[in-house]
Amino acid sequence: MIGQVSSPEWVTDVVSAYDQVLSEMFWFVAGFGIVYLVGQIVLIPFLTRVVRSRNRNNPTIETATETYLRVVLIGFATLTGIIAAGYGRILSESAVVIAAITFALGIAGQQVFGSLISGMFLVADPDFNVGDWIEWPGGNGTIEAVDFRVTRVQPPNNETVSIPNTELTNNSIKRPYGRSRYRITEQVYVAYDEDTERALMELQQIAINYEAILGDPAPTARIVELGENAITVQAEFWIEDPARSDIVTARSDFRRSVKRHFDEEDITLAPPSAQLLSGKIDVTDGKTESPTSNSE
């Protein structure tokens, strides 16, 4: 018959402590998981659909709403898990704990919260939307998404650039294609011996006949400068829906049309600046003396 062996008291204390830790961990995971799953499966999709129905054709608010709701959900689920684990009274009664948490969040999350607030301002800006082309001091590109910490922008080379939201709110942002129309200005240099009036009329007519250019406002042509070697004439015209148009292609096509049409009409574009040299060279006893020359 084997006698009953009693466990030492310290073993019982260790097992009891582990039981308490495991129990608290279980209730924390259970509270966090239930709130997070319900919010992720039910609440966020529902609120996202509501925002989408009230803000059609505005993916900026839709994506930002989903991002910020997920952040709020994680914070609420964490708080629920802490309360379910039995630490709610400690958080509510201990000023030291609250102060420590506040200090840690203030130090570690200063930039994160700054980016969050900046992102909220960007989302609330009606002139800052997904799909817009923007220019900022660090580059340019099309907005893809406004996230919790950064804004993702696609530059012309098809990369993806993540820009801190604070950088966009602290610097000036330019939207060159922010309206339904965009004005293009092109300059041409015409020789002085050409009929400038005829060059202006032909330049304006080229713009009128170009299909991509709007008729209202009508294209214009004017003289902007009497330069040292040429007369600068300028054409101004408008194109529609610049967000979808290739501005570089439109400029190139217009310049090709100007060159081809001016060649057909025998209108000379400004030649390179010319210099006339005059003088003489004297050779004496196999030595060349420095020439005297004048330049014009």
Image: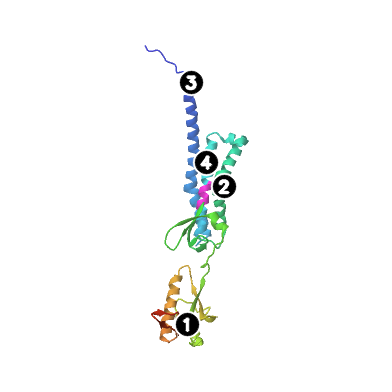
Label 4 Cα crowd, 10 Å radius (few <14 / some 14-19 / many 20+): some
Kindly identify the amino acid type of the residue bearing the numbered disc 4.
Thr
Mark found first going from the N terminus, 3 or 2:
3
Which mark is in front, 3 or 2?
2
* Amino acid type at mark 3: Trp
Mark 3 or mark 4, earlier in chain: 3
User: Residue 10: which disc?
Assistant: 3
Residue 78's tag is 4
Q: Name the residue rendered at 50%, 48% in the picture.
A: 70
- Which residue occupies the foreground of this view, 269 or 228? 228
Viewer-proximal residue, 18 or 136? 136
Q: Nearer the viewer, mark 4 or mark 1?
A: 1
Residue at (50%, 84%) from the top-left corner?
200
In the image, which is nearer the foreground, mark 1 or mark 3? Answer: 1
Q: State the separation of the CA atoms marked 2 and 4.
A: 20 Å
Q: Are marks 1 and 3 in contact (CB under 8 Å)?
A: no
